[in-house]
Amino acid sequence: MNYENIKQCKNPDLHIHSIFSDGSDTPKSLIENVRKAGLDVFALTDHDTYLGCEEVKKMLSPFDPYFIPGVELSCEGEFGKYHILGYCYDINKSSIKEAVEYTHGVRMRKVDKRFAFLSENYGFTFTNDEKEMIRKQENPGKPHFVNLMLKKGYIEEKSKGFDILAEYKNEERVITPEEAIDAIFSADGIPVLAHGILADGSKNLSKEEIENRVSTLKKCGLMGLECYYSSYTEEQKNTMLELSEKYNLLVTAGSDYHGVNKPVKLGDTNNPDPEVMKRFYSTVLKLL
């Protein structure tokens, strides 16, 4: 696929999940849905894996929207939880392989710990087959547990399930955002802070809190901010755009689409300005 005209794109979605993490779309159905949504550029950013990207690449035709390989790494550092997006990395570089392997391992070990938490704190019981169903997922996450709780009748709506799981405190060491940035950068990729002012996606940071994060990570090699995001308020979006300008960072746009596992539409990226996005596309063009 010739990426020469990628800078002309106007309908991006650079934050998408598939069945290779906690989304519901297969690579095939994702490509079909991308076409239906009228996107002209998209990125698959599954949690702690790049396997889905390899499958998507095999299925694309020359006439499909531009595709940017991505990954989303779960981190925790000085100011709390973060998610770091990586784009256009070289999967043959050891740094990205090691980071993904480690974060994937943490995710898998959390499965049994989450089951224990739900049993001990809420009295929820699950059969061995139900537990094994979760373990067999490529990258099991909260939506898998929420769907199972909903099916068992332990909750009446998904939001309650996410609230319950948010109470679980992981005691295992996870990588820091600085380590994630270094891993992506060392693999010739573009590290970007996901849903910045919402932290790991579940909080609402103050302007001072998000600027502390951005200024700290900029010094460590952060290259971009997800300034256009499906659930930002207008004020939050403007705060992120102001920070991108102040710290000379690239701007991306993402929906955080998970198929039927979350109520977010593919392509809902909060009206990104194509002109503001051009610097990111120019950087991508140098790497693809």
Image (tube, rainbow, N blue to C red):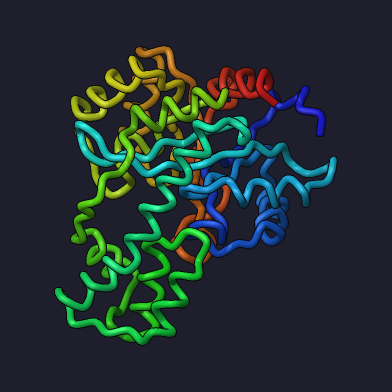
Q: Which residue lies furthest to the right in this view?
A: 62
Q: Which residue lies furthest to the left in this view?
A: 121
* On screen, residue 28 above or below 81: below
Closer to us: 109 or 114 = 109
Q: Residue at x 56, y 52 (%)?
A: 266
Quarter residue 64 falls in: top right
* On screen, residue 225 above or below 97: above
Residue 70 spot, x, y in % from top left? 56, 39
Closer to us: 208 or 87 = 87
In which quadrant will I find the N terminus? Answer: top right
Q: Which residue is drawn at 32% across and 84% down?
A: 126
Q: In this view, does 113 lie to the left or right of 179?
A: left
Residue 19 spot, x, y in % from top left? 56, 61
Closer to us: 10 or 55 = 55
Q: Is residue 172 left or right of residue 75?
A: left
Residue 221 spot, x, y in % from top left? 41, 18
Q: Residue at x 44, y 51 (%)?
A: 104
Q: In this view, does 67 lie to the left or right of 112?
A: right
* On screen, residue 200 above or below 92: below
* On screen, residue 132 above or below 85: below
Residue 183 spot, x, y in % from top left? 46, 29
In which quadrant will I find the C terminus? Answer: top right
Q: How many labels does the image show?
A: 0
Q: Which residue is drawn at 53% across and 21% down?
A: 276
